[in-house]
Image: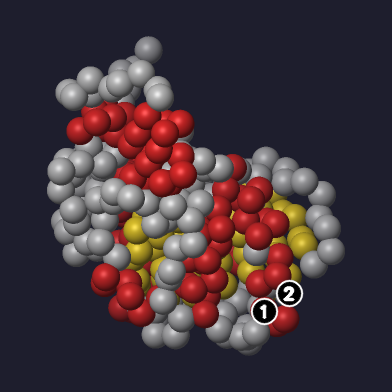
Amino acid sequence: MTASSTAAPSSRRLLLTGAAGGLGKVLRQTLKPHASLLRLSDIVEPQAPQENEEVVVCDLADKAAVDQLVKGVDAILHFGGVSVERPFEEILGPNISGTYHIYEAARRHGVKKVIFASSNHVVGFYKQSETIDALAPRRPDGYYGLSKSYGEDLATFYFDRYGIETLSIRIGSSFPEPQNRRMLCTWLSYDDLTQLIVKGLETPNLGHTIVYGMSDNPTVWWDNRLAAHLGYEPKDGSARFVDKVEAQPPVAADDPAALYHGGAFTAQGPFEEA
Ligand code: 15L
């Protein structure tokens, strides 16, 4: 039997998928104090294991491999899969089948908590003039956003049917600093992302909670009051980057980057056969 994910970090065994990716590499460092063991997986080999780490190469599209991957952990931080807009065929295995495999393995092995790296692209087609909360109907802006939307549906289903709890973090733009005007609104610092994950691990009765992953930015399009039970208090904000970003050339008013929550993602595709 696995320990509860709300257990003290000294006895918390975490699986991090996508550990060789941009956010995965950051979380590998920042989550160290919050886990007794970090099992790090990716489709490409993550860096060699350090103390209290295990490294596993795993294709999320391989159901049997994912089943083995999940065995013996207390909670899963699911950050693996394709993280940008791509043709449906490239998204299907890692993101859609892969997330299903994660939940099935969680069910089979009695893992009761998942932190799911969802994305703002599940609501990417809202206009930047609109502010929405987690109850707003989803408006995915591409196949990537659709796969995250499906992941959120899996989270709801596996809670209702099997009691597996999930925090879906609709990550805005998690980079060292905001890279453009849109990201002044969507930016999520690495420290605030880490705080959200830890809140997700420690909050009891999570059910399926959806939270927008953003720092305390001067302008935001998302309302997190429905996730108040997490007690998330962002410590960073994009205000200190405003001057630097606004020195960039202006963006045309009809550019998707200036129109939609999802920015340029809303204008990608179609992906025709060669
Ligand atoms: C995402 O979901 C992507 O993974 C990331 O690369 C960024 O593009 C981000 O959204 C964003 O919207 O800025």
Q: Mark yes or no: residue 5 visible.
A: yes
Residue beneath the point at 56% across and 83% down: 6
Task: Say what amino acid the circle numbered 1 marks.
Answer: Pro
Provide residue 165's location: percent of width, then percent of height. 42, 76
Q: Is residue 156 left or right of residue 64?
A: left
Residue beneath the point at 25% across and 61% down: 223
User: Is 171 drawn above or below residue 102 in the view shown?
Assistant: above
Disc 1/disc 2 C-alpha distance (Å)? 6 Å
Dot 2 beta carbon under 8 Å from ligand 1: no
Please, what secondary structure does the residue beneath circle 2 have? loop
User: Is 1 drawn above or below residue 60 in the view shown?
Assistant: below
Residues at discs 1 and 2 in contact (Cβ within 8 Å)? yes
Closest to the observer, 247 or 86: 247
Q: Quadrant of residue 258?
A: top left
Dot 1 beta carbon under 8 Å from ligand 1: no
Task: Say what amino acid the circle numbered 2 marks.
Answer: Ser
Q: Quadrant of the C terminus?
A: top left
Please, what secondary structure does the residue beneath circle 1 have? helix
Residue beneath the point at 46% across and 81% down: 203
Provide residue 259's location: percent of width, then percent of height. 20, 33
Provide residue 43's location: percent of width, then percent of height. 63, 43
Going by the picture, which residue comes out furthest to the top?
274
For label 1, the crowd category at 10 Å Cα-Cα, with few meaning under 14, some 14 to 19 and many 20 or more, is: some
What residue did someone put label 1 on?
9
For label 2, the crowd category at 10 Å Cα-Cα, with few meaning under 14, some 14 to 19 and many 20 or more, is: some
What residue did someone put label 2 on?
36
